[in-house]
């Protein structure tokens, strides 16, 4: 199928797809399989994953804790950009893929492997994200994508294959939706969720309570920013991963960060996804609040014009592309003065700004006041308005209705 391969590093999660893949790879390639599991904050014990991979045929297992790198070098740059995809999706799955691929390529180099493998379907975005990263980081690596070759054409077929080979899997036919969790979010798709009219069961959610079940008393928090990055919650400085974990707790218990959307995949189809992103939602709101005091109007306008292209680059798998890196440099330059604090009220699914402050703030109360001041001459506005109306008057006189 893909030619002779001597050693393969598999991106392994222990889920349905990758549980089956080890057995399938051994049958098809008869080579050494090394399993690699990235800890990007799944919130679960990963040692059983090691045991399972070894039991199903892996010769070696790497479990790498990437949580701090994930938060600092991937999530925080994305948050500095205020990136949303199609005005809704906070890119929680998409942003984890380039880091996982980077570490997978590093392990392949260390182990002398000539092949890498992922368990992404041929219909999804993740195959593109992984493979664009692989080919950028190691153009000569052999890429194996079982979903594009095997005759196991459905989740049900995979479950039957696993049963035949005695492979334990965490999915049942009663709950066949796919789950992807990391430090930033958790996503659900497939199975019963493929019907866009279907209402998800409440017991599906893992990071947040339903807004109506959140506490009747609001929670107030403060988040401090330095150069566009959050550094402290309620005055306590903490590492990027720990800060995000803390905000997930605050947001989750207050029912914040759930969305249910139909998005446009890069491969051309629409897909329904349900997401929980409590901490990330809070950070978007807080970041904008501090920016409102510290970023010049025209700089903010230029940065905001890049958000759709920046978000699309991440969603489509172009994290390591020159265009994303160029946009990142421009975005980061816009953040050099974003120092300050946002105060937020969390209440039954809502995240409301109740205050913001910055030592070096562009907001000047003495000028903005409606009371008497010495910094602004109101009669200057007349000429300002007259000059801005000039082209409108000429246009109206020339083309307007007679």
Image (cartoon, helix red, strand yellow):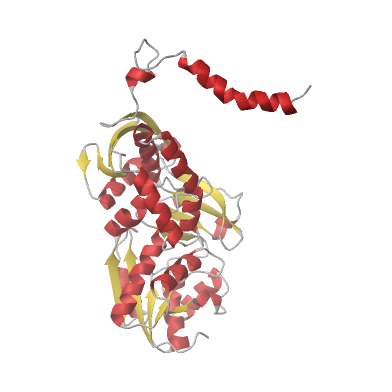
How far across and how far down the image is residue 120, in percent?
Answer: 49, 69
The image quarter containing residue 40 is: bottom left
Q: Is residue 163 left or right of residue 223?
A: right
Foreground of the two, 314 or 359: 359
Q: How many marks?
A: 0
The image quarter containing residue 135 is: bottom left
Residue shown at the point (47%, 62%) measured from the top left? 317
Is residue 343 visible in this depiction of the protein?
Answer: yes
How far across and how far down the image is residue 231, in percent?
Answer: 25, 44
The residue most toward the top is: 372
How far across and how far down the image is residue 50, in percent?
Answer: 30, 73
Q: Is residue 345 left or right of residue 264?
A: left
Residue shown at the point (35%, 82%) measured from the top left? 113
Residue shown at the point (44%, 41%) measured from the top left? 210
Q: Is residue 272 above or below residue 38?
A: above
Residue shown at the point (32%, 56%) measured from the top left? 73
The residue most toward the left is: 236
Quarter of the image with the C terminus is top right
Foreground of the two, 86 or 17: 86
The residue most toward the right is: 402
Q: Is residue 92 above or below residue 61?
A: above
Foreground of the two, 102 or 45: 102
Is residue 207 visible in this depiction of the protein?
Answer: no
How far across and how far down the image is residue 80, in percent?
Answer: 37, 46
């Amino acid at each position: 199928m893909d030619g002779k391969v001597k050693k393969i590093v598999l991106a392994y999660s222990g889920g349905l797809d990758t549980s089956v893949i080890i057995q399938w790879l051994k049958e098809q390639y008869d080579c050494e399989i090394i399993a690699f599991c990235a800890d990007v904050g799944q919130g679960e014990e990963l040692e059983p994953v090691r045991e399972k991979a070894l039991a199903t045929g892996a010769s070696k297992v790497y479990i790498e804790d990437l949580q701090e790198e994930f938060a600092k070098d991937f999530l925080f740059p994305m948050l500095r950009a205020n990136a949303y995809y199609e005005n809704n999706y906070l890119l929680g799955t998409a942003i984890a893929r380039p880091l996982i691929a980077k570490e997978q390529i590093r392990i392949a180099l260390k182990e002398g492997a000539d092949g890498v493998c992922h368990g992404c379907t041929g219909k999804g975005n993740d195959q593109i994200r992984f493979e664009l990263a692989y080919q950028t980081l190691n153009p000569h690596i052999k890429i194996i994508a079982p979903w594009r070759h095997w005759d196991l054409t459905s989740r049900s077929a995979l479950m039957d294959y696993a049963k035949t080979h005695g492979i334990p899997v965490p999915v049942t036919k009663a709950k066949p939706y796919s789950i992807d969790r990391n430090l930033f979010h958790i996503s659900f798709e497939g199975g019963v969720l493929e019907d866009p009219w279907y209402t998800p069961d409440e017991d599906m959610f893992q990071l947040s309570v339903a807004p109506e079940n959140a506490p009747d008393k609001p929670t107030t928090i403060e988040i401090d920013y330095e150069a566009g990055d959050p550094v402290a919650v309620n005055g306590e400085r903490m590492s990027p991963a720990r800060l995000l974990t803390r905000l997930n707790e605050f947001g989750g218990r207050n029912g914040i960060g759930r969305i249910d959307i139909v998005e446009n995949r890069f491969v051309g189809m629409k897909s329904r996804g349900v997401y929980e992103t409590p901490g990330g939602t809070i950070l978007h709101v807080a970041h904008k609040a501090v920016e409102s005091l510290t970023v010049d109007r025209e700089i903010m306008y230029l940065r905001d014009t890049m958000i759709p292209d920046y978000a699309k680059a991440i969603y489509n798998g172009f994290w390591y592309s020159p265009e994303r890196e160029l946009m990142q440099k421009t975005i980061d330059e816009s953040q050099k003065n974003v120092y300050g604090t946002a105060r937020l009220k969390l209440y039954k699914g809502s995240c409301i700004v109740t205050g913001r402050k910055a030592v070096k703030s562009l907001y000047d109360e003495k000028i903005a006041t409606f009371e008497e001041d010495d910094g602004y001459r109101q009669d200057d506005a007349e000429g300002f308005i007259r000059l801005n109306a000039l082209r409108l008057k000429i246009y109206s006189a020339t083309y307007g209705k007679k």
